[in-house]
Amino acid sequence: MTLSVVVPLYQEAAVAPELISRLTSALDSLGSPWEAILVDDGSTDGTWELIRDAAERDERFRAMRLTRNFGHQAALTAGLWAAEGDAVITMDGDLQHPPEVIPALVEKGREGFDVVYAARSEEDSEGWFKVHSARAFYWLLNHLASLDLPPGAGDFRYMSRRVVQALIAMPERSRFLRGMTRWTGYSQAVVEYDRERRAGGGSKYSLRRMTKFAFDAIVSFSALPLRIASVLGMAFSLLGLLYLLYVVYVRLFTDHALAGWTSVIVAVLILGGVQLACLGIMGQYLGRMYEEVKGRPLFLILEDTKDSHDQGQDRGQDRRQPRWQPGQQREPAPAGVATVSESAAHRPDDH
């Protein structure tokens, strides 16, 4: 069995040399063929030069450079698209996902599981806020979308070839690969590990990016927020009707006058706030529909060290994707490819 390991990297020059060394040792210990695909997601700190040099020294390493920073999930997808192994392991490049856990994932996969998650143990090296906010997010997502994601499971996991093919075939732009992997439904297992501290540099996930990621995950896998908006609308409509009946009753059957405009203003503000919140929820879904309709590629490749081995092939075309013609059902196109020699990046077979 040939194993592929996909590692997205962004501004990880301080970590890359140790990552490459530890990856090599861990993968060599398996005693079977392997490849490591290092995807530079638009770094500007010298990460690309380091991984390119590693690929030149050892042909089992493949370095890919995206045209800009497309995001962690898009970079992972680029690596999955390029991976050729019978099984694929994805992991982060900051060494908080220890390469030494790879043999345990492979061993569990050999038991017949299509997906093996590496889940963080209770001894987590991250701070209190990040640990507990992650737990709250998984609890909320599992209740909203019924995904039943294992607590502490991130993007460190083993996947069989058929799971990878299923993920590549999914065309959505706002990608939450953890949920997409769970959604495939293939046999899945969990291996616990102790997450290490970052070997260098800092986290690339700010609070703003983590919040956006959480929104993407929830909107991608649950329509419950829309149903909540509908229920709120009906509930406040019912309250408004009851209040109207109360006003009519007081006016016709009592001598009490209703107090001024305060109650009216409060009601208007509450209803206006609920309406704006519901419009915002609908806007989240509509915005994602807009992104999907545009049909842009998930990523564009600027450089790929494997190109030197494929001189006779059209490097501006996704060779795995059938050509689409007008009048035919469009095939999903998860990747865009550009080469250094081209004057401008273009979309492959996505006319």
Image (tube, rainbow, N blue to C red):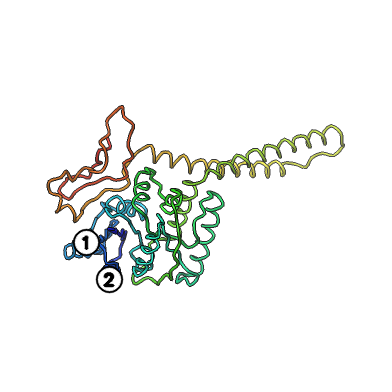
Which residue is outermost to the left? 312
Which residue is outermost to the top? 327
Q: Is residue 133 left or right of residue 83?
A: right
User: Label 1 is placed on what type of residue?
Assistant: Arg
Asked if residue 160 is positioned above or below residue 288 in the image, the reply reads below
Residue occupying the point 45% across, 72% down: 125
Q: Position of residue 94 (x, y in %)?
A: 34, 66
Secondary structure type for disc 1: loop
User: Label 2 is placed on what type of residue?
Assistant: Ser
Neighbourhood count class around disc 2 (C-alpha, 10 Å): few under 14, some 14–19, many 20 upward: few
Circle 1 residue:
60
Residue occupying the point 41% across, 56% down: 113
Asked if residue 294 is positioned above or below residue 72 in the image, the reply reads above
Asked if residue 119 is positioned above or below residue 160 in the image, the reply reads below
Q: Position of residue 337 (x, y in %)?
A: 24, 46
Q: Quadrant of residue 263?
A: top right
User: Residue 128, can we see it?
Assistant: yes
Q: Quadrant of residue 115?
A: bottom left
Q: Quadrant of the N terminus?
A: bottom left
First in sequence, mark 1 or 2: give its number. Answer: 2
Q: Position of residue 133 (x, y in %)?
A: 52, 62
Number of the label disc, if any, that sits on residue 208: none
User: Residue 15, can we see it?
Assistant: no
Circle 2 residue:
25
Residue occupying the point 53% across, 43% down: 223
Secondary structure type for disc 2: helix
Neighbourhood count class around disc 1 (C-alpha, 10 Å): few under 14, some 14–19, many 20 upward: some
Which residue is outermost to the front? 111
Residue occupying the point 72% across, 41% down: 261
Q: Quadrant of the C terminus?
A: top left
Q: Position of residue 283 (x, y in %)?
A: 49, 41
Asked if residue 333 is positioned above or below residue 196 in the image, the reply reads above
